[in-house]
Image (cartoon, rainbow, N blue to C red):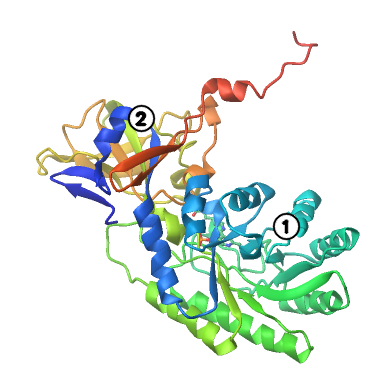
Amino acid sequence: MNNFEYKRKILFCENIAVEEICKKIKTPFYLYSSKQILDNFDLLAKKFKGCNVLIAYAVKANSNKSILKLLAKKGAGADVVSYGEMSRALKAGIPPNKIVFSGVGKTDLEISRAIEHKILQFNIESQQEFLIIEQLAREKKIKANIAIRINPDIEAGGHPKISTGKKTDKFGVSSDEAIKIYISAKNSPYLNIVGVDMHIGSQILQMKPFKNSFKKIEKFCKELEKNKIKIKHLDVGGGLGINYSSKKIKDITKEYTNLVKDISLRTKKKIIIEPGRFIVANAGILVTKILYKKSNEEKKFIIVDAGMNDFIRPALYDAKHLVKQIKLNKDKYKEEYFDIVGPICETADVITENAKLNKSIERGDFLFIEKVGAYGSAMSSTYNSRGLIPEVLVSKNMFFEIRKKMKEDDFLKLEKVPSWIK
Ligand code: LLP
């Protein structure tokens, strides 16, 4: 995480001391390094130089407009799962011919809009969805580009709640069903068969599931070709994991990019990858302030101003994120273990258990949660009537509030009381 570094025991994001930002913006807030986002993107893009690989950033990981714009300028495409995400991507300057539309529950309205925008491809997840896309394309007399998402029935190895490639998961269709759909699609003048799609899960840290699923997708393409169906794009999904811990683990990035490169050179097709976490996770921290300290015979608690509504990964997936001080000016031998908890009225509102922090940290001191750039802000809510928190982007020695805090009044404005209660 080299764009978040301690210099003389003070945490910096690029060239700015985080405590300087805390003087201007009230905690809790998300803080992102633009350099880290661009470095992560470049790391992949450089490996694919000269190959026909489209990096379609999975917008769901972090959909902030400024972040999408940073990536659009780099030539990224987008993997979207709603019209909301699609319009953000378009507004950020990602052209429709770099947008793929995934998701099991696309509405008729979302499909219609995507057809009108002539996106690169629909990743179709069921027979019924296929029929609706055909019908809407026919009504509009616009050819829709389609790919079918295959469910390869593969164990991806991550947390079961974020695994998507097993038969028991709701995603995609079996290869047998897909073949049938492709064959009927061939006869429609309003459908352009362009690709095959797959996405097996998220936070994958081993090569085996990728290798197996890539093999399956290639084999499936050959089968399609036997049926005289020609495929131009192979969308192999996202899923590349990152190291959230302080321990060293095997880094598979190089092996993964080689695998993508190989399949691109071997098949001579356009390969689409949909990374989300890999691009933004380590580019973001959540800065929070200590509200209270308390202890009993069992535990020492630190209550901070960020809660599970702001950051739900620990409560939802038992995700482990390191929590650290933004100022390390104390003696490191006087450390103690604390449970860092939020203000929400739920026992699950624990950011981390047993964080090792200096004994003397006190009310008013700032802490930060590491590697929350992906599925952090994007999954936040207003639970307990708390407004969404600011997002701040750093570039070198500049910072900018790329999303303002949502005020309590902002959501009250959306609510109306019927006359029969008044
Ligand atoms: N493509 C599709 C079709 C997806 O469903 C996803 C993620 C991605 C790409 C991007 O996957 P990534 O490269 O980020 O692993 N909220 C969970 C993760 C859910 C992932 C959902 N789909 C978490 O916080 O871990």
| The quarter of the picture showing ligand 1 | bottom right
Circle 2: residue type = Ile
Give how far across and how far down residue 379 sits, in percent: 53, 44
In the rendered image, the vertical position of residue 104 relative to residue 28, given as above or below? below
The quadrant of the rendering that contains the N terminus is bottom left
Find out if the beta carbon at label 2 lies less than 8 Å from the nearest ligand 1 atom. no
- Residue at 35% across, 71% down: 251
Q: Secondary structure at mark 2?
A: loop
Circle 1: residue type = His
Residue 302 appears in the picture as rendered: no
In the rendered image, the vertical position of residue 37 relative to residue 180, given as above or below? above
In the rendered image, the vertical position of residue 24 relative to residue 49, given as above or below? above
Give how far across and how far down residue 250 sits, in percent: 33, 71
Give how far across and how far down residue 358 sits, in percent: 17, 38
Task: Kindly indicate the quadrant of the structure image that contains residue 222.
Answer: bottom right
Q: On the picture, is 132 further left or further right than 281? A: right
Give how far across and how far down residue 376 sits, in percent: 46, 46
Query: Pointer 1: what residue?
Result: 117
Q: Nearer the viewer, mark 2 or mark 1?
A: 1
Query: Pointer 2: what residue?
Result: 25
Q: Secondary structure at mark 1?
A: helix
Q: How many marks?
A: 2
Q: Nearer the viewer, residue 210 or 147?
A: 147
Question: Pointer 2: residues within 10 angstroms few (<14), some, or many (20+)?
Answer: some
- Residue at 51% across, 24% down: 407
- The residue furthest bottom is 226
- Residue at 78% across, 75% down: 177
The quadrant of the rendering that contains the C terminus is top right
- The residue furthest top is 422
Res. 208 mark: none
Alpha carbons under labels 2 and 1: distance apart: 38 Å
Q: On the picture, is 123 further left or further right than 320? A: right
